[in-house]
Amino acid sequence: MATEYTKPLPEINDENRAFWEGCQRHELLLQQCTECGHMRHTGPACPECWSTGAKWTPASGNGVVYSWIEVHQRYNRAFEDDLPYNVAIVELDEGPRLVANVTGAGSHDIQPAMAVEVVWDDITEEVTLPRFAPA
Ligand SMILES: [Zn+2]
């Protein structure tokens, strides 16, 4: 675990707190609509039926790369040592898409629809980031 973490941290609020607490336990949680069963990442209402009823449900942690970019430009000094790095959209088996990094693979090794699985990066005492590695 890093002793000094200088990159931006997620803003944890009442809407996403359960998600981030799950990450601390290395458990990837999604919201499942209690009306229609649709799975979503986080949000105040179901995008399918607009119900506000939802329960936090563990996801498999498995998915595929939907898209990705490789960042070569330094937009934030805290990321300078990581250049180049990727930012990917991972489509989970349950349907929702997460923005995350793919670790353990060079950018030229990442392929569309490549199978990935969640891995955990405990960046601070309070925050653990889900990242994805080739499955
Ligand atoms: Zn619904």
Image (cartoon, helix red, strand yellow):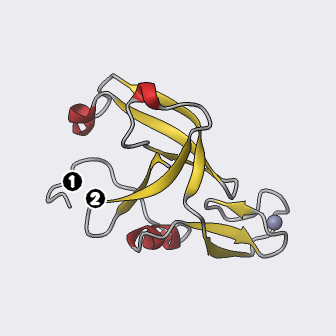
Packing grade of label 2 (10 A; few <14, some 14-19, many >=20) is some
Quarter of the rendering occupied by the N terminus: bottom left
Confirm or reject: label 2 Cβ below 8 Å from ligand 1: no
Q: Residue at x 75, y 75 (%)?
A: 53
84 sits to left or right of 21: left
The image quarter in which residue 66 lies: top right
- Mark closer to the observer (2, 1): 2
- Gap in Å between the C-alphas at discs 2 and 1? 7 Å
Number of on-image labels: 2
In this view, 113 is above or below 84: below
Outermost residue on the front side: it is 135
State the image coordinates of residue 35 (x, y, percent, origin top left).
83, 74
The circle on residue 5 is 1
Q: Which mark is residue 66?
A: none
- Residue at image x 28%, y 29%? 83
* Vertical order, 62 against 76 (above or below): below
| Along the line of sight, the residue nearer the viewer: 110 or 125 | 110
Residue 129 appears at what percent x and percent y?
Answer: 39, 57
Q: Are marks 2 and 1 in contact (CB under 8 Å)?
A: yes
Under circle 2, the secondary element is loop
- Residue at 85% in and 62% down: 49
Q: Nearer the viewer, residue 51 or 102?
A: 102
Kind of residue at badge 2: Ile
Could you tell whether 37 is left or right of 109 in the image?
right
SS state under label 1: loop
Provide the residue designation for mark 2. 123
Q: As shown in the figure, which amino acid type bears the numbered disc 1?
A: Tyr
